[in-house]
Image: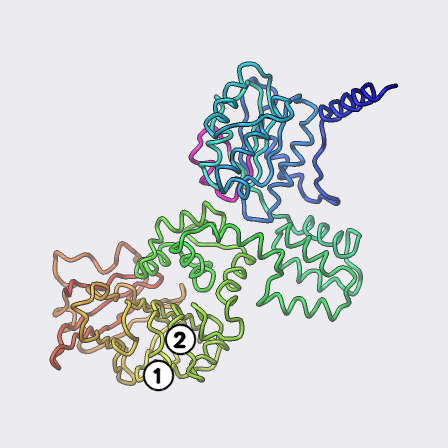
């Protein structure tokens, strides 16, 4: 056999190998995928002559790619022409990357070796044109990040031959919503039994924990909350480590998520604009499991545009809203906390948000407040009271949200002011310091006196003030009626008694709940003169807009 014959045979063997379907690697010990696979396959109609287009969405690490790979492998023998495009998000950052993905897709489905394109539009035309002389195709687009990317590869069913199946995985549900041809499925976390099995295969190389590790394993399962990525990463990390090392890891995870988990989860956060990033961090640090309407009212006062922002976070699978309540996976909440800490892990005074009692105590007792701090959430329902020293507030020029929760039996001291009640949150307008507008409050009173800075009328951020975001939060079971001799007089003087003004109930109706009378003296001081005393009523669990026009 001469050299030319040998080369010819090698080329034939290479061509045969190329034409034989190649299964994708999906890893060992695939556990708990049956329910997800069943529901995705239900959306794919293999018996009809229609094009099936299915999108799988969910948070990072939930198993979207694994689901797509398993389905791709299962259906591969039904298709002569097929393509699996990995990491579309990363590879589509520029036109050259898009072009390379189009070339790979066309090489796969046209079964050519070295097809080259001159531009993206040419690639689109060739994909559409291929429909007319090809049979059905199986295509997976993995990790699509924005609707524009689908436009380059598979925006609708008209591009493909009848019987084709197109599967997309994404962290951004918006990609699927704007392309009507796609059915969508949200990938779910693993149930406890499946999560335990997956974790144990990685931590112990068996389907159950070793005797001395049962409780520790349950704590890890509680931490991971069914997220496959966390179960695999933690299981592999803890493999063949002793009990003390497990305990140390669990303690460390409270403030320092493992980097391999953090990197995957943070991809969705990194794709947000600055306003949505702030919104996400506020929810992670302050408002997880709070009512959507309540959070919206507060964050509107911070000018974060929460009505659209919350929708974007939900589309990105960073939050979910069920029954009017904002929910967030525990690992996403920890990721948010880690982002706040990451640049100054040992210096809470330089963080943008404070929510742990010990950190807040350290900042105020050591006067470590800085211009970085935007929000403080202090829960005094169980902890001992601390003095929020006015001097520490002087440096917090960017502070926009102060949220305090405490018991009715306790008085809260902020500077020279004392707050009585069950809880109060204040959204702070941008100004040169909290002392310019929180004034003196007499002991034993339920009045809060707010002083605007001298230049308030020249600052657009201060016009109208932020008293719409001063509120009292009450437990559902708690009813309180504050009686004050001057209540009727104050009500008569208040601008809210006007028949043309909106009702104080702000649309919140409750026949059986009593009103909490909350008095707020809005003091505008110019030339040592003060004016306007406002009276507000609050229904428990509702936020009431108590601002009249003072411009």
Q: Secondary structure at mark 1?
A: helix
* Whole-percent x, y for residue 332 in the image: 53, 56
Residue, disc 1: 391
* Whole-percent x, y for residue 156 in the image: 47, 26
- The question of residue 9 being in magenta is answered with no
238 relative position to 90: left or right: right
Assign the N terminus to one quadrant of the image: top right
- Residue at the (45%, 27%) spot, across then down: 121
Local packing at callout 1 (Cα closer than 10 Å; few below 14, some 14-19, many 20+) is: some
Res. 189 mark = none
* Whole-percent x, y for residue 388 in the image: 38, 81
Q: Is residue 292 above or below residue 338?
A: above
Residue, disc 2: 370
Q: Is residue 17 above or below residue 492?
A: above
Q: Earlier in the sequence, mark 2 or mark 1?
A: 2
Assign the C terminus to one quadrant of the image: bottom left
- Residue at the (44%, 64%) spot, across then down: 286
* Whole-percent x, y for residue 392 in the image: 37, 81
Q: Is residue 462 above or below residue 108?
A: below
Q: Are marks 2 and 1 in contact (CB under 8 Å)?
A: no
What are the residue bounds of the magenta stretch?
A: 168-183
> Where on the picture, by quarter, is residue 398?
bottom left
Q: Nearer the viewer, residue 48 or 454?
A: 454
Q: Nearer the viewer, residue 11 or 206?
A: 11
Marks 2/1: CA–CA distance: 11 Å
């Amino acid at each position: 056999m001469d050299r030319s014959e040998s080369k010819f045979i090698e080329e034939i063997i290479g061509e045969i190998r190329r034409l034989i379907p190649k299964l994708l690697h999906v890893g060992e010990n695939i556990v708990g995928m049956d329910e997800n696979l069943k529901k995705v396959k239900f959306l794919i109609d293999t018996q009809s002559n229609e094009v099936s287009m299915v999108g799988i969405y969910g948070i990072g690490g939930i198993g979207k790619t694994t689901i797509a790979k398993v389905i791709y492998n299962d259906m591969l023998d039904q298709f002569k022409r097929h393509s699996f495009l990995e990491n579309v998000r990363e590879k589509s950052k520029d036109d050259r990357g898009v072009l390379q993905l189009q070339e790979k897709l066309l090489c796969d489905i046209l079964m050519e070796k070295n097809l080259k394109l001159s531009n993206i539009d040419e690639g689109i035309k060739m994909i559409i044109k291929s429909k007319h002389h090809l049979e059905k195709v199986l295509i997976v687009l993995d990790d699509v990040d924005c609707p524009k990317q689908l436009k380059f590869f598979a925006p609708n069913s008209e591009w493909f031959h009848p019987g084709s199946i197109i599967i997309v995985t994404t962290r951004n549900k918006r990609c699927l919503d704007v392309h009507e041809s796609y059915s969508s499925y949200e990938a779910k976390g693993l149930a406890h039994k499946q999560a335990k099995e997956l974790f144990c295969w990685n931590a112990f190389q068996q389907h159950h924990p070793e005797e001395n590790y049962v409780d520790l394993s349950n704590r890890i399962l509680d931490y991971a909350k069914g997220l496959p990525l966390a179960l695999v990463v933690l299981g592999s990390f803890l493999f063949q480590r002793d009990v003390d090392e497990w305990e140390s890891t669990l303690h460390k995870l409270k403030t320092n998520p493992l980097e391999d988990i953090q990197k995957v989860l943070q991809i969705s956060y990194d794709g947000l604009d600055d306003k949505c990033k702030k919104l996400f961090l506020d929810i992670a640090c302050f408002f997880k499991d709070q009512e959507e309407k309540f959070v919206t009212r507060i964050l509107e006062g911070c000018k974060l545009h929460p009505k659209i922002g919350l929708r974007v976070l939900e589309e990105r699978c960073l939050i979910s809203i069920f029954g009017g309540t904002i929910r967030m996976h525990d690992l996403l909440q920890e990721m948010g906390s880690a982002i706040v800490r990451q640049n100054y892990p040992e210096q809470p005074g330089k963080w943008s948000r404070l929510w742990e009692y010990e950190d807040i105590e350290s900042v105020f007792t050591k006067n470590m407040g800085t211009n970085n701090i935007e929000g403080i959430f202090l829960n005094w329902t169980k902890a001992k009271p601390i003095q929020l020293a006015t001097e520490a507030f002087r440096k917090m020029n960017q502070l926009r949200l102060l949220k305090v929760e405490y018991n009715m039996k306790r008085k809260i001291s902020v500077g020279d002011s004392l707050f009585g009640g069950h809880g109060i949150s204040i959204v702070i307008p941008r100004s040169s310091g909290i002392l310019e507008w929180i004034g003196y409050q007499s002991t034993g009173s339920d009045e809060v006196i707010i002083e605007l800075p001298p230049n308030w009328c020249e600052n657009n951020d201060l016009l109208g003030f932020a008293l719409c975001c001063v509120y009292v939060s009450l437990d559902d079971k708690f009813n309180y009626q504050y009686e004050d001799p001057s209540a009727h007089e104050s009500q008569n003087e208040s601008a809210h008694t006007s028949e043309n003004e909106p009702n104080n109930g702000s649309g919140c109706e409750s026949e059986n709940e009593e009103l909490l009378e909350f008095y707020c003296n809005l003091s505008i001081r110019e030339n040592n003169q003060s004016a306007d005393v406002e009276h507000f009523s609050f229904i428990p669990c509702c936020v009431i807009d108590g601002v009249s026009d003072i411009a």
